């Protein structure tokens, strides 16, 4: 095995095989739990070019990354995004990557669904916190529910498997979880519920809206029969099958349950910062490494990064202040 083919293994023996890439910090929505009303976005010159992103992604793939998720911000609002996706998808053709996927707010899906499928993407995650049009515009501060539902339908029609992500919020959508399970499963979509995390300053009471998914699960068990299943995506979600609908339901509980021991992922921001943990500040600057040392110098920096990967995060649901200053749209969800 050559030096460059050595896998990425951290100080706790965990192999990093999953890379999330935030391709832009920009978004056409301003979800209240994710962004502040007046977000200041990065100047374009600070954002990695597609060429730079490609070099970095190639370096990870050579070191054994098998799964890649594009996210943001909203990945589908970055101009020319299909060029990047098409370029990355050659790693699917060669067998180096097992999966290329994307997390999206769905607003642009009607336009892109067919092309995403053609590029080898088989599954996508779409964020959908409510099926009520007014509440949808409220929580996203500008989104149109209908446009997103059209996007989801287009994705389904194009043959993309859809998983919905719903951030569970007390007093906002807690009463909609049962209807959302039914709506999603009737259409053959998986649904994953997510606990809100304290990432970045937002102008709302996060601790007040915090809804422990343990509690949600107990309440759902009054309506549905939740059967444990072994389904694992290599991610933090724990899944059950809902007997009455036959569909899959996931729970991501970063706040009340620590899932870090099996963490296999790292996150690259659109400025080339590599974050080793969503809930911690530690990162390495891959853009500087690339610009100073070139592609060949990257390997050593990736090895240094592995040593920095922490054992885990430790969020406190009752704390008002963010656990880390950067927003989810920066690190990529
Ligand atoms: N714009 C795309 C979207 O909304 O799907 C991709 C980026 S978004 C940051 C990725 C995921 O992070 C979304 O499912 C969103 O609901 C979730 N998210 C954002 N801020 C969060 C927070 N503070 N806590 C938990 N999930 C959050
Ligand atoms: Fe945009 Fe996604 Fe953040 Fe909402 S959650 S503001 S859609 S990046």
Image (spheres, grey):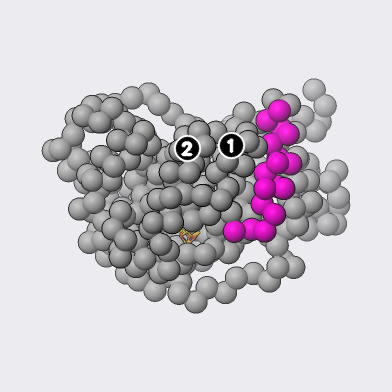
Q: Position of residue 87 (x, y in %)?
A: 74, 41
Q: Secondary structure at mark 2?
A: helix
User: Looking at the image, which is closer to me, 329 or 261?
Assistant: 329
**Residue stretch rendered in magenta on the structure:** 77-93
* As drawn, 38 above or below 145: below
Mark yes or no: residue 82 visible.
yes
Q: Which residue is mark 1?
A: 117
Q: Which residue is mark 2?
A: 157
Nearest to viewer (mark 1 / mark 2) = 2
Q: Is mark 1 within 8 Å of ligand 1?
A: no
Answer with left or right where residue 318 lies relative to residue 148. Answer: left
Q: What residue lies at 55% left-to-right and 44% top-to-bottom? A: 113
Residue lying farthest to the left in this orientation: 222
Q: Earlier in the sequence, mark 1 or mark 2?
A: 1
* As drawn, 151 above or below 281: above
Q: What residue lies at 63% left-to-right and 36% top-to-bottom? A: 118
Q: Secondary structure at mark 1?
A: helix
- Residues packed near mark 2 inside 10 Å, few (<14), some (14 to 19) or many (20 plus): few
């Amino acid at each position: 095995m050559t030096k460059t083919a050595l896998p990425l293994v951290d100080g706790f023996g965990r192999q990093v095989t999953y890379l999330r890439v935030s391709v832009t910090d920009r978004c056409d929505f301003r979800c209240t739990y994710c962004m502040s009303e007046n977000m200041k976005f990065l100047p374009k010159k600070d954002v990695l070019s597609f060429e730079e992103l490609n070099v970095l992604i190639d370096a990870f793939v050579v070191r054994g990354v098998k799964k890649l998720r594009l996210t943001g911000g909203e990945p589908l609002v970055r101009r020319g995004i299909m060029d990047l996706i098409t370029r990355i998808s050659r790693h699917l053709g060669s067998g180096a990557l097992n999966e290329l996927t994307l997390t999206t707010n769905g607003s642009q899906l009607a336009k892109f669904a067919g092309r995403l499928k053609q590029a080898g993407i088989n599954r996508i995650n779409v964020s959908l916190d409510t099926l009520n049009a007014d509440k949808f515009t409220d929580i996203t501060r500008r989104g149109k529910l209908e446009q997103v539902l059209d996007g989801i339908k287009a994705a389904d029609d194009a043959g993309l498997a859809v998983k919905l992500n719903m951030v569970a919020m007390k007093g906002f959508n807690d009463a909609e979880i049962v209807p959302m399970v039914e709506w999603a499963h009737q259409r053959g979509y998986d649904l994953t519920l997510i606990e809100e995390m304290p990432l970045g300053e937002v102008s709302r009471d996060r601790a007040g809206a915090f809804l422990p998914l343990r509690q949600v699960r107990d309440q759902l068990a009054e309506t549905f029969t939740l059967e444990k299943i072994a389904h694992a995506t290599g991610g933090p979600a724990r899944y059950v099958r809902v007997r009455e609908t036959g569909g899959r339901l996931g729970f991501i509980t970063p706040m009340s349950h620590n899932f870090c021991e099996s963490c296999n992922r790292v996150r690259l921001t659109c400025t080339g910062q590599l974050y080793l943990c969503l809930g911690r500040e530690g990162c390495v600057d891959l853009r500087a490494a690339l610009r100073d040392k070139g592609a060949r110098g990257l390997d050593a920096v990736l090895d240094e990064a592995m040593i920095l990967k922490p054992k885990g995060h430790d969020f406190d649901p009752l704390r008002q202040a963010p656990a880390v200053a950067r927003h989810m749209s920066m690190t990529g969800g």
